[in-house]
Image (tube, helix red, strand yellow):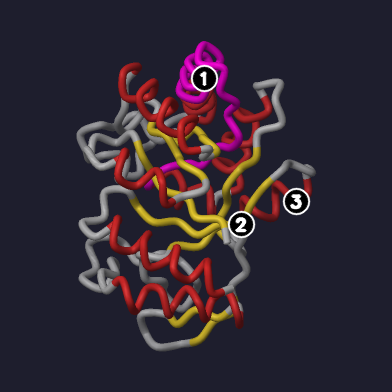
């Protein structure tokens, strides 16, 4: 089981979380992060043998990248290339290889349903010579596109978030969006792994397939959740 986490976002807990994960998604200037935070997170990833990836977003620090903005495809592509490229440049200095790209927040959700924006993200990733993997939600528009274009990808599920009956993440404004019982999250993840079944917020069981499981680094109980998921890794 591969566990990934969004880091370098200013939560102050990166050093605590890094030993418990396999991949990290590093904020690279859009919603959070700067040169110092990127270097610090890359060094931690290298120290713990964690695969680092770029975590680009809408350029919107005021809303932490969680608000969908009207941005032209051309401008969005340039912004993504700038964000991803800034992390790659720093990684090169540290002799660290960037493994993947995972969009953040509103951009992630938009790429899941919009072929136009999913194509923009794919084009931005293709700008770079290395074979970067893209983290995509299962059953999404962008998953279909990366398959069609033969782009390296991993499907992703979320350990700490609730889904609706269409397998979309509940918006953070919904009081049921965030899961916070680490024991229940562990058992939920176990069912996802063994049966490929996830129970939605409305109580419906849906099929889900995933290669990597995400825990948000800014979750108040991120460390406890990661520790429980690591117990699960030892059982499977």
Q: Looking at the image, which residue is at 52% across and 35% down?
A: 53
Q: Looking at the image, which residue is at 49% across and 33% down?
A: 54
- Asked if residue 175 is positioned above or below residue 111 in the image, the reply reads below
Pointer 2: what residue? 155
Q: Is residue 234 left or right of residue 164?
A: right
Q: Which mark is in front, 2 or 3?
A: 2
Say whether residue 63 is magenta.
no
Quadrant containing the N terminus in the rendered view: bottom right
Q: What is the CA distance from the residue labelled 3 to the residue labelled 1?
A: 28 Å
Q: Earlier in the sequence, mark 2 or mark 1?
A: 1
In front of the other: 59 or 189? 189
Q: Which mark is in front, 2 or 1?
A: 1
Question: In the image, residue 180 lies at what x, y percent?
Answer: 25, 69
Q: Looking at the image, which residue is at 38% across and 36% down?
A: 70
Pointer 1: what residue? 91
Say whether residue 90 is magenta.
yes
Numbered label attached to residue 151: none
Quarter of the image where one finds residue 25: top left
Q: Looking at the image, which residue is at 45% across and 23% down?
A: 83
Element class at badge 1: helix
Q: Earlier in the sequence, mark 2 or mark 3?
A: 3
Question: In the image, residue 218 lies at what x, y percent?
Answer: 26, 49
Circle 2 Cα neighbour tier, 10 Å, few/some/many (<14 / 14–19 / ≥20): some
Question: In the image, residue 187 lies at what x, y percent?
Answer: 42, 80
Element class at badge 2: strand
Q: Is residue 108 left or right of residue 13?
A: right
Q: Is residue 15 left or right of residue 149?
A: left
- Asked if residue 228 is positioned above or below residue 98 in the image, the reply reads below
* Range of magenta residues: 82-105
Q: Earlier in the sequence, mark 3 or mark 1?
A: 1
Numbered label attached to residue 147: 3
């Amino acid at each position: 089981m591969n566990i990934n986490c969004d880091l370098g976002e200013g939560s102050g807990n990166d050093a605590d979380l890094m030993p418990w994960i396999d991949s990290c998604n590093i904020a690279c200037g859009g919603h959070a992060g700067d040169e110092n935070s990127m270097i610090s997170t890359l060094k931690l990833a290298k120290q713990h043998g964690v695969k680092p990836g770029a975590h680009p977003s809408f350029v919107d620090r005021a809303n932490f990248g969680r608000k969908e903005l009207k941005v032209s495809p051309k401008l969005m592509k340039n912004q993504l290339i700038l964000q991803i490229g800034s992390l790659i440049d720093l990684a090169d200095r540290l002799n660290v290889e960037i493994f993947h790209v995972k969009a953040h927040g509103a951009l992630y959700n938009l790429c899941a349903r919009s072929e136009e924006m999913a194509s923009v993200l794919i084009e931005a990733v293709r700008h770079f010579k290395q074979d970067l993997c893209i983290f995509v939600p299962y059953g999404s528009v962008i998953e279909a596109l990366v398959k069609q274009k033969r782009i390296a990808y991993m499907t992703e599920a979320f350990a700490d978030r609730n889904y609706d009956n269409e397998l979309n993440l509940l918006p953070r404004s919904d009081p049921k969006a965030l899961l916070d019982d680490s024991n229940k999250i562990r058992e939920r993840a176990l069912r996802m792994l063994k049966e490929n079944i996830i129970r939605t917020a409305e109580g419906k069981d849906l099929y889900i397939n995933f290669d990597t499981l995400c825990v948000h680094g800014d979750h108040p109980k991120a460390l406890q959740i990661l520790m429980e998921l690591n117990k699960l890794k030892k059982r499977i």
